[in-house]
Image (cartoon, rainbow, N blue to C red):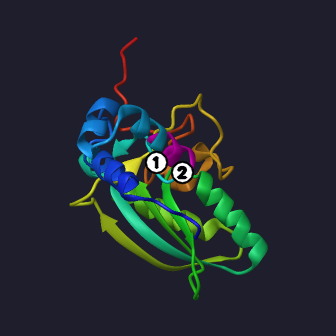
Amino acid sequence: MGVKLDDLDFRIIHQLQGDGRISITDLADKVGSSRPTVTNRLKKLVDKGFVVVNGGLNIRRLGFKVACVGLEVKNGTDRLDVENCLESCPRVLNVFRTCGKANVHLSMWGEDDQTVNSMIESFRDYPNVDIVYSHYLGTPIHGDVKLRVEFEEHREPPCGRICSKCNRYVNGWCMGCPCSADYRNPLLERLEP
């Protein structure tokens, strides 16, 4: 593994878990070290990717839904393609390469039950992919699950599909891809012209 953290690193991380917006001055006071030392230590932790500092929407607070899905991808080339597509999908929270029949495991989100089900069904459209299992988890009751916000100028969805041509979208079973122009964002306040 090659990772070595010391007591000060863990004290800094512990304080950040409680308040990610704590000032360096307050953080230094709480961990019993100087501002320059804490600043340098925190910079190293972030630069090396050991500490992640970013924002996002809280799935639990919004009442959005989560599911876990296990996919069997039939060959290595297709698996890399599926993993790359899932990695860039705004509805996918994380992806794991696993052993066993389901060799790709992912967790994903949707604004409502229909959108979650539509997303799960969309995996049937991938070539050489079978759905081994899907576990609907609903809305988290504990723990904050961060959702990244898509705010680019309506780009094409990473999967290459066009929502307005999708049967699930047209029939109202899905709100569309959060990064597409077709997205029916339930959080967006529409301004009257």
**Quadrant (top left, top right, bottom left, bottom right) of the C terminus:** top left
Overall secondary structure of the magenta section: helix
Residue drawn at point x = 50 percent, y = 61 percent: 94
Q: Would you say the residues marked 1 and 2 are in contact, meaning their CB atoms lie under 8 Å apart?
A: yes
Q: Residue 49 carries which label?
A: 2
> SS of the residue at dot 1?
loop
Query: In this orientation, which residue lies closer to the viewer: 55 or 88?
Result: 55
Q: Residue furthest right?
A: 77
> SS of the residue at dot 2?
loop
Locate residue 117 relative to residue 61 in the image: left or right: right
Residue drawn at point x = 55 percent, y = 70 percent: 96
Residue drawn at point x = 64 percent, y = 66 percent: 125
Q: Where is residue 122 in the image (x, y as percent from the top left)?
A: 56, 63
- Is 63 placed above or below 20 here? below
Query: In this orientation, which residue lies closer to the viewer: 23 or 81?
Result: 23
Write down the residue under mark 1.
52
Locate residue 19 relative to residue 73 in the image: left or right: left
Q: Which residue lies furthest to the left in this view?
A: 141
- Is 87 placed above or below 124 here? above
Residue 176 in view (yes/no): no
Residue drawn at point x = 37 percent, y = 52 percent: 8
Bin the neighbour count of mark 2 within 10 Å (Cα to Cα): few under 14, some 14-19, many 20 and up. few
Q: Position of residue 158 (x, y in %)?
A: 65, 48
Query: In this orientation, which residue lies closer to the viewer: 120 or 68?
Result: 68
Residue 116 in view (yes/no): yes
User: Which residues, given as a range, are shown in magenta?
Assistant: 42-49
Q: How far apart are marks 1 and 2 (CA)?
A: 6 Å
Please identify the quarter of the rendering in which residue 167 is found: bottom right
- Is 25 placed above or below 176 here? above
Residue type, numbered disc 2:
Gly
**Quadrant (top left, top right, bottom left, bottom right) of the N terminus:** bottom right
